[in-house]
Image (tube, rainbow, N blue to C red):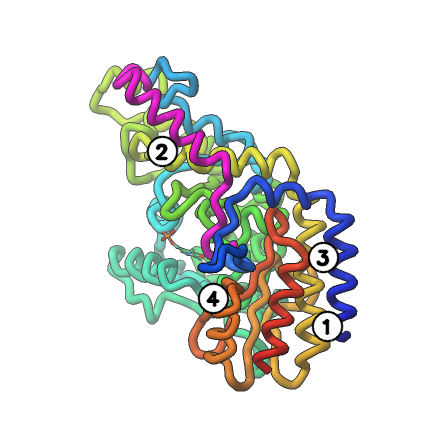
Amino acid sequence: MTLDELRHIASTLDRDDPLAAYRERFHIPRRGDGSEVTYLCGNSLGLAPRAAAESVACELRAWAELGVEGHFQSERPWVSFHELFTPHLASLVGAKGHEVVAMNTLTVNLHLMLTSFYRPSGERRKVLVGHAAFPSDRYAIASQITLRGGKPEETLLVAQPRPGEATLRTEDVVELIDRHAWKLQLVLMDGVNYYTGEFIDIPTITAAAHRHGILAGFDLAHAVGNVPLALHDWGVDFAVWCHYKYLNGGPGCVAGCFVHERHGLAPEPLPRLAGWWGHDKQSRFVMGPDFRPIPGAEGWQLSNPPLFSLAALLPSLELFSEIGMAQLRAKSEHLTGLLDRGVREMFPDWIEILTPQEPSRRGCQLSVRLRHHAKSTFAALLAAGVICDWREPDVIRLAPVPLYNRFADVVRCVEVLSCAK
Ligand SMILES: *Cc1c(COP(=O)(O)O)cnc(C)c1O
């Protein structure tokens, strides 16, 4: 493929893109000269929806006008504000309403879930994790192991790619689970890995764990709003995610959590770290001493949530519900497919794509390894206004997202790469 061919394909795809108008719903950052950047970093921090400011301003006004009465008397009462998220989150992750909740931040939710679901006993103490786990997840699980008197280096079992390969094979993960089943208590993996962009086979890995009575939890930070998910049907035990990557909720935004109803509605509530916002809603304000959790994921809430962060997030979730993941995913496969094709065909000896090529095994993101001039190429991309990110030692992550990226953005990225070559 030549650059001209790429430009031609992209302009046709942009012209026929049914989601093209949604770009207008976002603020696209600008460069010094006033031109829009080519934003390929929605996997790290999604762009600001234009409607976010008014949504936050609305709650600021309610606070100014109503003070404490805003909890019950504002247009969107704060006491139940988080419930506005239920249908959106349930549809994004494929869950029942009582299986999801927006609360806290990602690593906090991971700790809350591990407190309830990592329960080593007898020989069953080990946790299976993926090879390129995000550091925060690794610290969280290691500290949970230490808190229970274990040693992380003896307790963590790490699934590795085969020599010469960058990503995992499902059959290898399943084989590892089968082989270590008697010692494993929990499988804790990323739905989409932040480093490689690999989308793992969640249902197969969950089923493999369950065959041996092992629990399966997932960090969906890079999966939610990116790939289709069906957590309830897949039987996943728990999941956590953040909302500031593909879901555009803004930096440090309130995160999400899924607890399968087999645990959330269990007759005997699971042990957990408790707070008043997780207490039965009818008797919360009786302020009694005994904790009775709300049935379902909401029973893991601790505090009344940061309202302005929730308010900033809601407009983006409404866009996801309006469009639906099926349409977003269809465009996403084309966008990433075009980037994949451009890079693969134009720079075969220079750039290696670490992310799997099959659409079913990846989301938006392509992680590329440059065999030479990696750092200077990254600098050239930034200088040309192509916002992407760098991961040591030689990997650049490029993520065209279907909600606001155009096929022309893919062209721009490939153009700059071909100049830097
Ligand atoms: C982005 C990300 C985090 C970040 O954690 P915060 O608690 O939101 O700061 C953690 N884990 C994974 C897998 C991530 O992708």
Under circle 1, the secondary element is helix
Q: Where in the figure is residue 272, as x and y percent of width and height? A: 32, 39
* Residue 269 to residue 189: above or below: above
For marks 1 and 3, give the CA distance: 17 Å
- Crowding near pointer 2: few (<14 within 10 Å), some, many (20+)? some
Q: Quadrant of the C terminus?
A: bottom right
* Residue at (48, 41) in percent of width and height: 258
- Crowding near pointer 3: few (<14 within 10 Å), some, many (20+)? some
Mark 1 or 2, which is nearer the eye?
1
For marks 4 and 1, give the CA distance: 23 Å
Q: Is residue 94 left or right of residue 78?
A: right
Label 2: which residue? 308
Label 3: which residue? 334
Label 1: which residue? 3
* Residue at (50, 40) in percent of width and height: 49
For badge 3, the amino acid type reads His
Q: For ligand 1, tell me if the residue under mark 4 lies within 8 Å.
A: no
First along the sequence among labels 4 and 3: 3
